[in-house]
Image (cartoon, helix red, strand yellow):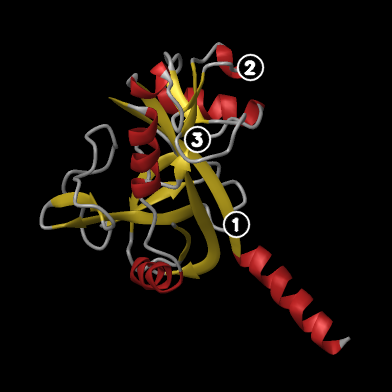
């Protein structure tokens, strides 16, 4: 009984300190089904799957509204090299344009934009930016990199803002998990005063912001 209670306590504690958040990222570079899968699995988690109205709304937001024929993960046959091709109107009805690329199929060689899904972990522990970076690299992969158009629902966070992998060093903002410089449409000061040189998401205003790196906040890992 004591062992059961200990395991239950640890499970509850884990649920209170971490939470999985899924986001969708629109990749406009046309690729084949197989290429899109490999890209998503390399840089994110996998091709996006539409499981309901929430996902439909999320992919529309990621694309900035309307999107044309794009690759998604197949709901008909969950195998490697199988994708579903649909646009924003078809997302609410059964999709028949499914490419099973282990077989001869003209769809397999067609090239289209696509959606990747990315699993993020919201860690409720409050840490400085450097402490959060160390925690993510020790327990996951890194502090989260996010597409600038997609700010996930962080309403469950215990702090108003949460740390991300944004950092200002050597005169530039960048993601610590990537070499890419931040996209220009992220609205952050071009030369922030110290110590306000760490990037966060504001959970109330749903916008990016620079904050004091020594402030203790919840944070996002991937």
Q: Is residue 196 above or below residue 23?
A: below
* Crowd class of label 2 (few under 14; some 14 to 19; many from 20; radius 10 Å): few
Residue at screen point 39% across, 52% down: 200
Task: Find the distance from the CA under tag 1 to the CA under tag 3.
Answer: 19 Å
**In the image, residue 133 lies at what x, y percent?**
36, 67
Q: Quadrant of the C terminus?
A: bottom left
SS category of the residue bearing label 1: strand
Q: Which of 129 and 9 is in front in this view?
A: 9
The furthest residue to the right: 1
Q: Is residue 205 above or below residue 105?
A: below
**Which residue is denoted by mark 2 in the rendering?**
92
* 216 horizontally vs 171: left or right: right
Q: Is residue 56 above or below residue 170?
A: above
The furthest residue to the front: 104
Image marks 2 and 3: residues in contact by CB distance under 8 Å:
no
Q: Which of marks 1 and 3 is nearer the N terminus?
A: 1
SS category of the residue bearing label 2: helix
* Crowd class of label 3 (few under 14; some 14 to 19; many from 20; radius 10 Å): many
Task: Find the distance from the CA under tag 1 to the CA under tag 2.
Answer: 28 Å
Task: Find the distance from the CA under tag 2 to the CA under tag 3.
Answer: 15 Å
Q: Nearer the viewer, residue 95 or 5?
A: 95
Dividing the picture into quarters, in which one does residue 31 lie? Answer: top left
**In the image, residue 104 lies at what x, y percent?**
42, 23
**Which residue is denoted by mark 1 in the rendering?**
19
Q: Mark 1 or mark 2, which is nearer to you? A: 2
**Which residue is denoted by mark 3 in the rendering?**
48
* 74 horizontally vs 187: left or right: right
* Crowd class of label 1 (few under 14; some 14 to 19; many from 20; radius 10 Å): some
């Amino acid at each position: 009984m004591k062992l059961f209670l200990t395991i239950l306590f640890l499970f509850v504690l884990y649920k209170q300190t971490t939470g999985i958040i899924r986001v969708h990222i629109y990749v406009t570079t046309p690729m084949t089904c197989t290429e899109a899968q490999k890209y998503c699995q390399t840089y994110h988690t996998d091709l996006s799957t539409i499981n309901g109205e929430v996902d439909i709304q999320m992919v529309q937001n990621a694309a900035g509204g309307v999107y044309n024929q794009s690759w998604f993960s197949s709901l008909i046959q969950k195998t490697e090299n199988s994708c579903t091709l649909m646009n924003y109107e078809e997302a609410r009805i059964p999709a028949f344009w499914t490419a099973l690329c282990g077989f001869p199929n003209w769809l397999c060689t067609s090239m289209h934009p696509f959606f990747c899904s990315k699993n993020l972990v919201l860690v409720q522990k409050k840490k400085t930016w450097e402490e959060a970076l160390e925690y993510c690299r020790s327990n996951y992969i890194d502090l989260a990199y996010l597409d600038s158009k997609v700010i996930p629902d962080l309403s469950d966070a215990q702090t108003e803002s949460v740390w991300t992998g944004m950092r200002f060093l050597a005169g530039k903002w960048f993601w610590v998990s990537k070499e890419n410089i931040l996209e220009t449409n992220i609205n952050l000061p071009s030369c922030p005063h110290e110590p306000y040189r760490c990037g966060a998401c504001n959970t109330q205003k749903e916008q990016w912001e620079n904050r004091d790196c020594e402030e203790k906040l919840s944070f996002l890992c991937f």
